[in-house]
Image: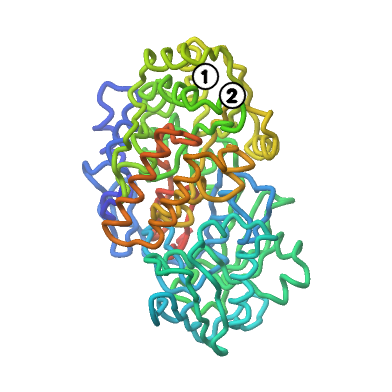
Amino acid sequence: MHLPDEARTGLSRRSFVKLMGASTAAAGITATLAACGTTDAETPAATPDGGTSPDGTAAPGGGDSPIEAGISYELGTNGYDPMTTTSALTLAANWHTMEGLTEIHPATREVYAALGADMPQQVDDTTWEVTLRDGAVFTNGEAVTTDDVVFSFDRVLDEANQSLYAAFLPFLDSVEKKDDTTVTVNLKYPFSLVAERLSVVKVVPMAAVQADQSAFDLMPIGTGAYTMTDNGAATQTVVFERNDAYTGPHPALAPSMTWQILPDASTRTNALTSDTVQAIDSVPVADLSTLAESKSVAAEQGFGLVFMMFNCGSAPMDDVRNRQAMMYALDYDQITSVGMSDLATPATSFVQKEHPAYKEAATVYTPQDLDKAKALLAETGLTTVRLLASDHGFFAAARPMIKESLEAAGLTVQYEEKKSSDVYATIDGSPEAFDIVVAPGDPSVFGDDADLLLRWWYAGDTWTDSRMHWKGSESYNQVQDLLDQAGEASGDEQMELWHQIFDVISENVPLYPIFHQKTPTAWNAETLQNFQPLAVTGLSFVDVSSTR
């Protein structure tokens, strides 16, 4: 949901108390946050630079103090290399240290020229050009060249590198050096989202990557406003310093940042209330009321979801009736209102209702329909399923409800929880390892358009072949054909094709959202200037300063 700045800045203590009424603290605030990103009752006054204090008074002016943050997600297993990394922490770090030719602002979601001096310029239907901005250098001091740009795109497109980002670029034929300042972007067919999509490829120094790929993965070298000085692997603290050589449009407004990796929810909350940190993500619902008394809190509706993924290549989930039965069985109201404390919305389509491409899918599974689920299971004879879930804390209370819903449909559920990395290590390439996986995902960190979101799960082999074992099926082939058609279309025609894909995946459910979540964030508006909560996973300090 896109709210005006003054409606996104947080809850004042007076507003919070007024809204509580006779409800419990958690219920009161989550009901408020569920209505829109933050309350619009007694909205705090905004300073000229967007900062607000919890009591509604203007925050101090901008400063030049370090930023301190608490991050809920732990380091992933694939490092920081922007060709391969997909973990929430490393992606958020790369927002600050890396750049593409274009970038998408993490908070506003607007596309802008980053390493490009201007937005991509169209030469003809399938040819675009981008000229590099003057004075761009990597944080190792080397000037950015068009050879670096070509190398960065080539490594993502090279199938041998198995970059998940390649699935976002099916329209791209090649990126070539035109001269020392300009690259030519050659398309396979006309594509309407070139500027947005070029942002998924971050430009890296060819010489450094070729010299030591492993070292680059651990301590990346980019052109962003900050440079990383501690990757957190040993210290559980990621440290950044301002890149004084940065020449781009969003310079660092703080001399340094320190992100403490705090996966424990209570530790993260205590760090904010004690002012050890100035902002935290994944705010526990139980702590929202306490934090609202002294800090700013928000819950932004986004695309981020928790999904059910099925092993479509083996019995019993190769039968679409069993997949549909699992979806019909879920008690969506209980899962979202109680399990997620109203910080989630039941899915009625692949994208959330606030998304520009939203259309209710042809098959909708909410509200719960146990009779339909039982009827389908009676047809197939299924009585037992294996359910593997990731142990992410933000939906811990919802997981038992998912299991109980399936049991209410008459199933025996063999249930197991594992860390996210262990979930995928278990199932990758192992058709016998599971029937159902429940886990979160949020590809909207890469971009918001429906084509990108769909391709994350339904185009690349990692998900369709190695995980859901759906590749080669009739519905898989249908989706690929529609994706290709939509990629070459624009306007209403493109939107209609996306809607057809929503319908196909809603009926065949190889992987499908249970709900789209609201992202709860808390921060100290007295010491963070221009901070904006995100509708995507992570924290952003782009254009943020500190008076700490």
Secondary element type, mark 1: helix
**Residues at circles 1 and 2 in contact by the CB criterion of under 8 Å:** yes
Q: Amino acid at mark 2?
A: Leu
Considering depth in this image, is 206 or 494 the residue closer to the camera? 494
Q: Residue furthest front?
A: 474
N-term-proximal mark, 1 vs 2: 2
Secondary element type, mark 2: strand
Q: Amino acid at mark 1?
A: Lys
Q: Residue at x 58, y 37 (%)?
A: 468
Residue 176 in the image: state x and y as whole percent.
56, 80
Q: Is residue 10 left or right of residue 277?
A: left
Q: Residue furthest left?
A: 41
Whole-angstrom CA distance, mark 1 to mark 2, is 8 Å
Residue 346 in the image: state x and y as whole percent.
36, 31
- Total numbered labels: 2
Q: Residue at x 66, y 56 (%)?
A: 162
Q: Is residue 398 left or right of residue 58?
A: right
Q: Is residue 297 visible?
A: no
Residue at label 1?
A: 403
Q: Residue at x 67, y 76 (%)?
A: 140
Q: Is residue 374 visible?
A: yes
Considering depth in this image, is 471 or 403 the residue closer to the camera? 471
The image quadrant of residue 190 is bottom left
Residue 517 in the image: state x and y as whole percent.
41, 38
Residue 163 in the image: state x and y as whole percent.
62, 57
Residue at label 2?
A: 387
The image quadrant of residue 384 is top right
